[in-house]
Structures are given as structure tokens and as C-alpha cells.
Amino acid sequence: MPAQKIDIHADEVLEDHTQSEYEGNSEDSDNVNSEGDSGSESDSLDSVGSRKLLTPTRELALQIFEQFKAISSPQSLKAVLITGGSDMRPQATALAQRPHVVIATPGRLADHIRTSGEDTICALRRVRMVVLDEADRLLAGGMIGSMLPDVEECFSVLPPPSKRQTLLFTATITPEVRALKERPSTPGKPPVFICEVDTQKLAIPPSLRQMHLQIPITHREHYLHMFLLTPLNLPKSAIIFCNRTSTADYLTHLLRLLDHRVTALHSKLPQRQRVDNLGRFRASAARILVATDVAARGLDIPEVGLVINYDIPRDPDDYIHRVGRTARAGRKGDAVTFVGQRDVELVQAIEGRVGREMQRWEEEGVNLETRVVREALKLVGEKKREAMLEIEEGREVGGKRKRGMRKLVK
């Protein structure tokens, strides 16, 4: 999906993200040397922690880390991955060993800054370039789960703005990002350098078909099961987005019981399982990924042909990120949103944001309602009870008892 890009030289640490001042211009965007420093590129690369990249999710950080390793292998550059869900001790050791690039989620990096000691964070004090990927999410404040306090902690140990370059990348312009863009330039400072695409025209790629499917809210699972089995949808790799981790967990249990090849990605899963599940989906061992918005940003899985919004996102920008998992790089893709009786306003808000109306989902020769009545009412009802029992008993998808869950013996 085309992305808006805001390339910025930071002029002040983000003490308040809406009041920071920036300087820069396009001609020196590749120059990461400090003012008055005429050092060579190799000098910069040899600097301790000369690059730092922050991104909001562990999966996106891992994807960037793996791509960086592949691209940079001829130069023998040293990169470290700093994310939650992993042991902090080897991460602290890696930070202390003069890496060229630090790729991190803000929460875990902030934990190291607060607890790991000067020997670990000294690398961050010589950073020459900072990249905020998915900057709209990183800078979003005033909400539960805001990453802004951790981002500010990460900036607190960096060199002054005159000694580093800061770049922001985002596919959606939020009020926080717009405040940076629209802030008047400081007297005597060059203006902020900005490269922005036409979001109204390119928020949704033209190769993406947006559709809606009206369903009774009491039978969403029944319609989902039959929808996944239509002749056109059955061969497609699909991501199903939910608003809550509990819904994602429940659907994963249910769809597995209904014999779908399914896996899950959400914040309640252990990190090792998150990595393994995403790997299974990438390798097509699982055809369906049930996910929360953890999977909505940045993940590049070219084979995804279908995105299903089982729950409609409350924020239209989240819709843009979700459907951007398909129809990537000119490929075709479908996005289908399940719409209940009370969801009309949410759909209208999305259509207003992307500048296009959703079309009614249709497939030649398929009457979904008839299929649900004939084939799904009894079957899905039985499997729903089994799925809820598995969850209540603390069993993993597939029926195995979770580790740490002891069977009660009377």
C-alpha cells in the first residue's frame, strides 16, 4: 500500500510530541554526520549504535530485522533486535557490543534504559539516525496502550538533535503527526522536509476490492465458516481481524474444530508461539490467520488474497492498515467487512475516510444464507460449545492442555 513519508531532522527531543521542532532538507537526507563533521560513511557505520529504528509491534520489528540481515550481509553490519517476550540479559549484552543498528519496540528498549545500566545504553548515546516506523501509532497519545511515554524515554538518552537525523514514516496522518507537519519553522532553521502522497486517492490501492457482507449478529460464526468455504474463497490465504484478543482466541479454537487450517496472532500469546504461528502462516501450513491489530501494520505476506473484518475497527485508519495486508505491490486482493445491524455508521465513516464505497459481496452461484441454514446451523452450534469448553478448561487450540495447567484430582 502506498505510504505517506515524512522525513525529518529532529531539532528537539520529543518532550512533547506536538511541540517538537525539526530541521532538515532533502539534499542532505542521506548524510548522517553531525554538523561540522566531515567523517566518511565508514566512520559513521563504525559508530556505536549509529542507527536506531523503533516500530510498534514485535512481528514488524522481527520482519525488519530479518530483511536488514539479508540486505546488509555483504557489509558485515551488526544489528540487534530488542523486543518484549524475550530474555533481557542477552539483549543487554548485545546492546553493549557496539551494534551498528538497533531495531526495537519502544517498551522493551525503554525497560533497558531504565534498568540495564550505563554499559548497556551507552551505545544509544552515539546514535546518528533514528527512524520511527508506523509513526502515527508510536506518537499516539491520550489512549489506553499509548506508546508515547516509552518513545519519550527512548529519546531521552539520544544525542542532541544537532547530532542526529530523525525520520518518520506513516501510512496515515493523525493529529499528532499533523502537528509536527504544520508547526511553524523556527527562525533561522531550514523548514521540515516532507514527502507526502495523495492520501485521498492512494489510501486504498486500486487493485483492492472492498466489499461488505450484511449478517445477523447472532450467527456471525456460522456465516464466517460458510464464507471461508465458497469456491472462490477456499483457495485463498486469509487474515481475519478481530477487535479483541478473546474473540481471536475463540475463533481460532472454533475454526480448528471446523477443520480449517488456522493459526492466531495476538498479544496474549507467548512470544515464541507468536513467531511460530506467523511462520506457519507465511509457509502456508495454515491458510487462515486470526489476528488482532497486532497484524495490521507493516507485515508483508504477499500470498494473502483475502482480508476479513470480523469486527469493524472503530478507527477508519485502522481499517486502512488492516486491508493493506492484501493487494500489495500491484497484486489483486479482496477485503470483506462483516456488517451487523448497528454497524452502519462505522461503515460510513470508513467509506468517507477512504473515498470509496464498499460494494455488496456476491459470488456467482452462491447463496450464503441458504448454505448457512442447510449446512452450518447445527454443526457450528455444536462446535461453538466445544470451543468454549476448551477455552474454559485452559486447553490450547487442538485440545491439548496448556503448560502450567494442572488437572484437578478430587
Image: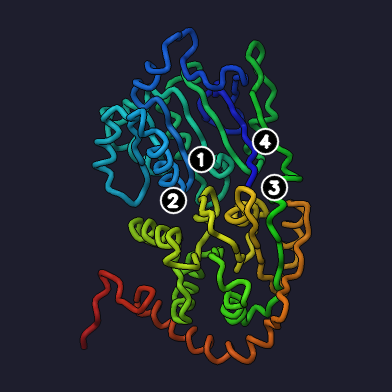
Amino acid of disc 4? Arg
User: In whole angstroms, how far apart are the C-alphas of marks 3 and 1?
Assistant: 25 Å
Residue shown at 26% from the left, 28% from the top: 119
Classify mark 3: helix, strand or loop: loop
User: In whole angstroms, how far apart are the C-alphas of marks 3 and 2?
Assistant: 23 Å
Amino acid of disc 2? Glu
Dot 1: few (<14), some (14–19), or many (≥20) neighbours within 10 Å? many
User: In whole angstroms, how far apart are the C-alphas of marks 2 and 4?
Assistant: 27 Å
Compared to 226, does 239 lie above or below? Answer: above
Amino acid of disc 3? Ala
User: In whole angstroms, how far apart are the C-alphas of marks 1 and 2?
Assistant: 19 Å
Query: In this view, which residue lies farthest toward the left?
Result: 409
From the top left corner, tell me how far across and down residue 35 is, in percent: 49, 11
Q: Which mark is residue 203?
A: 3
Amino acid of disc 1? Leu
Residue holding disc 4 = 178
> Which mark sits nearer the N-terminus, 3 or 1?
1
Q: Nearer the viewer, residue 144 or 98?
A: 98
Dot 2: few (<14), some (14–19), or many (≥20) neighbours within 10 Å? many
Compared to 64, does 20 lie above or below? Answer: above
- Residues under numbered marks 1 and 2 in contact, where contact means CB atoms less than 8 Å apart: no
Residue holding disc 1 = 148
Residue 318 seen anywhere in this rendered image of the structure: no
User: In whole angstroms, how far apart are the C-alphas of marks 3 and 4?
Assistant: 16 Å
Mark 3 vs mark 1, foreground winner is: 3
> Which mark sits nearer the N-terminus, 3 or 2?
2
Residue holding disc 2 = 59
Dot 4: few (<14), some (14–19), or many (≥20) neighbours within 10 Å? few
From the top left corner, tell me how far across and down residue 123 is, in percent: 33, 26
